[in-house]
Image (tube, coloured by chain):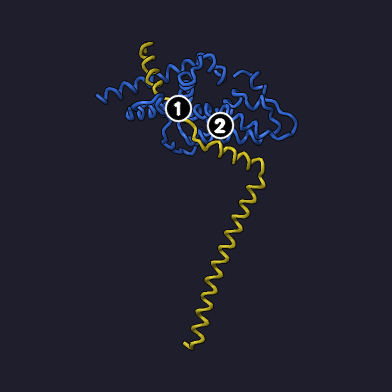
Amino acid sequence: MTDSANQRVRTQGSRDTDPADIALAYRTHAAALYRYAIMLTADAAAAEDAIQQVFVKLAGRKGLTLPGVIEGFYLRRAVRNECYRILSQRRRESAQMDGDSILAPAAGGSVDHEEKAMIEGALRRLPPDQREVIHMKIYEQLTFQQIADQIGEPINTVAGRYRYGLEKLRQWLAAFQENRK
Amino acid sequence: MTNQEFQGVEEILARYKPTEAPADLLRRVEQRASYRRRPWRELLIAAMSAAAEVVLAVGIRGLITGTTVIVLLLVASKGY
């Protein structure tokens, strides 16, 4: 995320944020933000909480202007912060994840349920920052530079997280396929 | 890890996609946002709920007391 993008979030006096702006921001960004949140937290309930919190806080902000509200970078950063806050709270409370499915088949046709469950389990075992980069690279098809800009980390860190994450997934997948034989 | 191995994992992951947001999430967000804009509404609901509990508790207690008094009066009137 660029700083200039963040700076576009402007406030105008003490006027309440227009509910229509919130609804527009939700319609424009919520689906993608939810997919991002569920991969970052690996937990459907946490993802829902994060999305709700961000949009409810947005509604409570005074005088947020439309360009600011619909600015995806701003919302992504807000959802990211909320997800990490929830993850940190759950770690402190040693709370269990809800176990709901975080993946769906990309296309129609038969699903290998065993493989899907294995991949979900493997993704849950990865650190959130590696899951985040894998999501942005594979499912949002962003470049490492774009990911680095959005999460505010150096490109080498981003590429490293992706490589380590994929390496672990490869090992777990190999073990899974070996056990299946 | 070779490029081929990388691509293999990427291809497996690409067979799936993150699950979509529940259809009623927007309704819940709007509901909570609307409560946030109107905190009095939340207070009113909480106050009404507390009042209903008190009325129910007093009612039940009154019913029990009334029944007990009637039974005692009946017993007394029969001279047991």
User: Tag 2: residue type?
Assistant: Glu
Say which residue label 1 marks. B18
Crowding at mark 2 (Cα within 10 Å: few <14, some 14-19, many 20+): many
Question: Residue A155, percent across and down?
Answer: 52, 14
Q: Which mark is residue A82?
A: 2
Question: Residue A36, percent across and down?
Answer: 50, 26
Whether B3 is drawn above or below A111: the answer is above
> What SS does tag 1 mark?
strand
Count of numbered marks: 2
Residue at (46% x, 21% y) in the render: A139
User: Tag 1: residue type?
Assistant: Pro
Whether A148 is drawn above or below A113: the answer is above
Question: Residue A163, percent across and down?
Answer: 43, 16
> What SS does tag 2 mark?
helix
> Which chain shows up in blue?
A
Q: Are marks 2 and 1 on the same chain?
A: no
Q: Which chain does tag 1 point to? A: B
> Which chain shows up in yellow?
B
Work out which quarter of the rendered image holds the N terminus of chain B and state it.
Answer: top left
